[in-house]
């Protein structure tokens, strides 16, 4: 466990385990590196596995500023430079996918071996020409207001939607504890930015091999989002997890880890 001091004196928590090709896991909005707890023990036997808590999340500093996808991408760039990472595979779940696409847009693909995108749309917003988006303005406004009025109740309702099967009390409790580490002010700020960012213009330029991992259950993200990405990103392949919703790495961890391993082996 370690902390990396960012340019504006914010400390970003990360863990770095194992040796071999480097995997960097980037979590979703309000979540943390803890959600990848079923990947690290398995994959670190063969790979160098780095997990991070983005600013404002998990164990990282709760800064009042910088809660945009663009800034999170710059924070990731600082991590890559400070640790001297090369030939990395960026694994982005949900909002983490936006962080990856913004990273590639800002800094290019030098040093990036491949990317893994887990259950995310090219944009979460329902633009006039993007009907599969997750939020319209009314839904987004409602969630932002609920975060301010009753963050706990919103999360208690949201977290079970990430899973195909019913979420048991033990798992709900640790996830609730983890997501409540994000103050409501930060949660609202980053929810808005990650919901209205539109990465569609970036996708066609991506050259790195890309693995798309999507759950069949569509409580949050439709499988059509994966099909759209497969058609938009030139060197991409789509893997559907039949017994998962938004979190195949927790719902089908053995398969998820094997799929990543197979993907990386195919790049040799």
Image: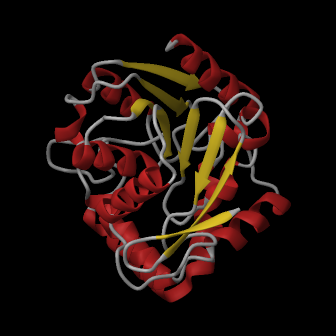
- Residue 118 in sight from this viewpoint: no
- Residue 154 in sight from this viewpoint: yes
Pick whichever, 59 or 130, lies toward us: 59
Left or right side of 259 for 266: left
Residue 38 against residue 112 in the figure, above or below = below
Pick whichever, 32 or 13, lies toward us: 13
x 41%, y 81%: residue: 145
x 36%, y 56%: residue: 73
Residue 107 against residue 232 in the figure, above or below = below
x 45%, y 82%: residue: 63
Residue 261, image quadrant: top right
Residue 230 in percent (x, y) is at: 35, 23
Q: Quadrant of the N terminus?
A: bottom right
Which color scheme does this rendered protein use? Answer: secondary structure
x 36%, y 81%: residue: 65
Pick whichever, 52 or 130, lies toward us: 52
């Amino acid at each position: 466990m370690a902390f990396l001091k960012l340019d504006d004196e914010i400390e970003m928590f990360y863990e770095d385990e194992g040796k071999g090709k480097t995997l960097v896991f980037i979590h979703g909005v309000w979540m943390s590196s803890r959600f990848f707890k079923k990947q690290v023990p398995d994959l670190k036997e063969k790979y160098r596995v780095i997990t991070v808590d983005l600013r404002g999340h998990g164990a990282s500093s709760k800064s009042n500023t910088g809660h945009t996808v663009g800034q999170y991408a710059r924070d990731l760039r600082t991590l890559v430079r400070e640790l001297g990472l090369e030939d990395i595979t960026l694994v982005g779940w949900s909002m983490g996918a936006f962080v990856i696409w913004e990273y590639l847009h800002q800094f290019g693909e030098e040093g990036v071996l491949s990317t893994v995108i887990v259950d995310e749309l090219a944009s979460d917003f329902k633009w006039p020409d993007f009907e599969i988006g997750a939020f319209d303005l009314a839904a987004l406004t409602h969630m932002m207001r609920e975060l301010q009025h009753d963050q706990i109740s919103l999360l208690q309702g949201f977290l079970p939607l990430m899973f195909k099967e019913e979420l048991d009390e033990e798992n709900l409790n640790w996830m609730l504890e983890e997501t409540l580490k994000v103050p409501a002010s930060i949660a609202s700020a980053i929810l808005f930015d990650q919901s209205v960012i539109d990465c569609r213009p970036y996708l066609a330029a991506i050259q790195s091999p890309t693995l798309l991992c999507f759950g069949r259950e569509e409580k949050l993200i439709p499988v059509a989002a994966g099909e759209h990405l497969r058609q938009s990103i030139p060197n991409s392949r789509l893997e559907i997890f039949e017994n998962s919703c938004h979190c195949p790495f927790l719902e089908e961890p053995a398969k998820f880890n094997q799929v990543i391993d197979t993907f990386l082996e195919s790049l040799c």
